[in-house]
Amino acid sequence: MFAYWQNFFRKHGAALSVFLLASVGFWIFMMILLPQAFMLDFSLRANVPPPKWGSDAHHYTAEHYRYMLYGSAQSVDSYNFVDLSVFARTIVAAIFVTLIDLALCYPVAYYLAHAATGGWRRLMVLSLIVPFWVNELLRAFAFKIMFGGNGIINNALLWLGVIDQPYDFIRNSVALYSGLSYAYILLMIFPIYNAVESLDRNQIEAARDLGSPWWRIHKRVVIPHAKPGITSGCTMVFMLTAGALAAPQILGGPSSLWFTQIIYQAFNQAGNWARGSAYAIILLVVCILFVLLMMRVFKVKLGEIAR
Amino acid sequence: MSADVQLDEVWIRFGDFVAARDINISIRQGEFFSFLGPSGCGKTTLLRAVSGFLQPSQGRVSIGGRDMAGIGPNKRPTALIFQNLALFPLMTVWENITFALEVRGAGRAARRKKAEELLELIALPGQGEKMVSELSGGQRQRVAIARALAAEPSVLLLDEPLSALDLKLRQHMRTELRAIQRRVGITFIYITHDQGEALTMSDHVAVMSHGVIEQVGDGNSIYNRPESAFVASFVGENNLFSGTVAATDDAYVTVDSPAGRLRARHAMRGGKAQLAAGDSAFVFVRPESLKFAAGASSASAEASSTEASSSTGALDNRIGARIHQQEFEGNFWQVFCDVDGVDKRVKLSMVNDGASMGRGPGEEVTLGFNADLAVALPQGELAAE
């Protein structure tokens, strides 16, 4: 161990070594460990105003976790259906959005990697990236306007005669799902694109030469090869969708609350940082467990994703 | 026997570039047919046209008498072995081998059985559960052959499959490939830039250059009776004397070259004479057809070289030369000689008969060869080189 650090310092010089260690240490400690540790600590303490922090009243308790389950700190008579159903709906919706993105992005990524050439491919990649130079909030508002009662989509459908009165895309969550699906689409496309692109073209041709129809080529050759990329994309989209705030806030209908909005309310409106922290921890842990479960189901190793 | 694969007036263009020009080839059922040529000569393009990965710009490809126009590679009775083999790395060996059967909906038991049969054929019994990455280069090679054979193609196409192997394995695989071909009895079409592979394995060889078929024939006729300057210089080693045709008849040509007046066979192409008086021509002489002739050579050398002394009287051509260097290769002596007016050193191969060569660098010698063992050809595309 000592020899390793000695070698490390000799290789990079004293100044650079200190800088590297300090910045990596800052990143890991200040930006990852410390905030999570504070959140965990808050979530396990009673909710008291800041002046009383550190006093006896700021004692350890699991009441906020209990509240998530039972809707009360003391009784266990009834479940907290409001929060639990929002939580369940958020997870299910995030899965749904992930699947939509996968269905949309796999063909695009495959096309980009193996069919598009030269300038055309560059143009397509640019047109995928450029819209994301626009701020996330502005993009969400743009969706809101497009899907609004007087928006371009309703007007087009009215003009085409598909509907005879404006459809409420906002109330029916169509706008929300569209906005969320679009929000993280690049995080799905590029990992899949990278994975598919590294596939030897001859393998596709070999499968075709051996009589395989196109769908079996994908099932047996392309998808198995791209699995780490697919998993990586799905994980990121799922995590970020479940934790999204801006899109649900702007595009969500009055009745469709996102779990992050409940966390936001706890912090900013109810002034209950403890409950907010507990809920955030619950969301984080459940999402991680879900992802690990899926990776086990689809037989992907964590190391493959990080490739 | 019937023609199995037939190309009629096939042209393949990529934009302005012509990759294959007016190709007419007829390959018989069950033969081992090679396309031989330098890289970029269009041989792989032709193979892709036969396998269906590209459509000829013009002309007809037929297999088993059926026109293949509009039929994709997955519907053709061909199987292709790729240069890099393109085995599926995420499947086991037996899954690789039986992929074609899986596609046709064969059950697992039937596939296992077929896989064992094929593993037996390629001498890898019981290795089905391994992953491709666990096999050696030669074993992968054989798995690729088995995978292609499992599709039960009537034509097997091979795109330089041996080029990634080391020399020893390559020579071994030549024999193996030929043996497998005899056993299964289907047509093999083999693409290579290695003349050794083409000559040893093939029933017929088509020599290609710049998208054109230069000559089709068995190994013997390609080597001994080249019909174009390209074939003569690409296949095997050849000494080349440039000159102008002085006289010609149907059988022989007389060429005036810096090395003197040379007489050589007149090569016909498509039954037609290729040379007339006044044309620029090359005279090609194989190193093994050159002899030391009596005359300027020393008496002691003549005594030791029985070959030279016995054939001296019959040599039609004589060239004055000076030995530059000699290399002993065990079974052969390779002797490099300077000839005035000839840029490239003339090479002579002599079988080692146990006696010492008896000549040394700097010695003036007379080289000779028989007109029947040399060939005169139009300079054609080689003229500029």
Image (tube, grey):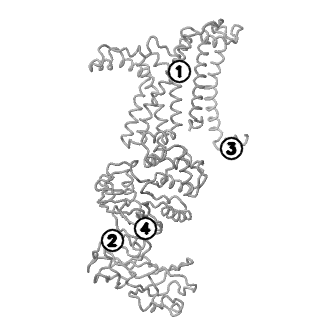
Amino acid type, label 1: Ile
Amino acid type, label 2: Ala
The chain carrying label 3 is A
**Above or below for A219 versus B318:** above
Name the spot of residue B293 as percent of width and height, x first.
45, 89
Q: Which residue lies furthest to the right in this view?
A: A2
Q: Do labels 2 and 3 share a chain?
A: no
Sequence-first tag of 1 and 3:
3
Give the residue number, with chain letter if any, for mark 3. Answer: A7
Give the residue number, with chain letter if any, for mark 4. Answer: B203
**Above or below for B46 versus A265:** below
Give the residue number, with chain letter if any, for mark 2. Answer: B383
Give the residue number, with chain letter if any, for mark 1. Answer: A91
> Closer to the camera: disc 4 or disc 1?
4
Q: Rounded to the nearest whole Å, what is the CA distance between mark 4 and mark 3?
A: 64 Å
Q: Report crowding for label 2: few under 14, some 14 to 19, many 20 or more residues within 10 A (C-alpha).
A: few
> Closer to the camera: disc 1 or disc 3?
1
Sequence-first tag of 2 and 4:
4
Name the spot of residue B195 as percent of width and height, x first.
45, 67
Q: Report crowding for label 4: few under 14, some 14 to 19, many 20 or more residues within 10 A (C-alpha).
A: some
* Residue A276 sits in quarter: top right
> Closer to the camera: disc 2 or disc 4?
4
The chain carrying label 4 is B
Q: Report crowding for label 1: few under 14, some 14 to 19, many 20 or more residues within 10 A (C-alpha).
A: many
> Closer to the camera: disc 2 or disc 1?
1
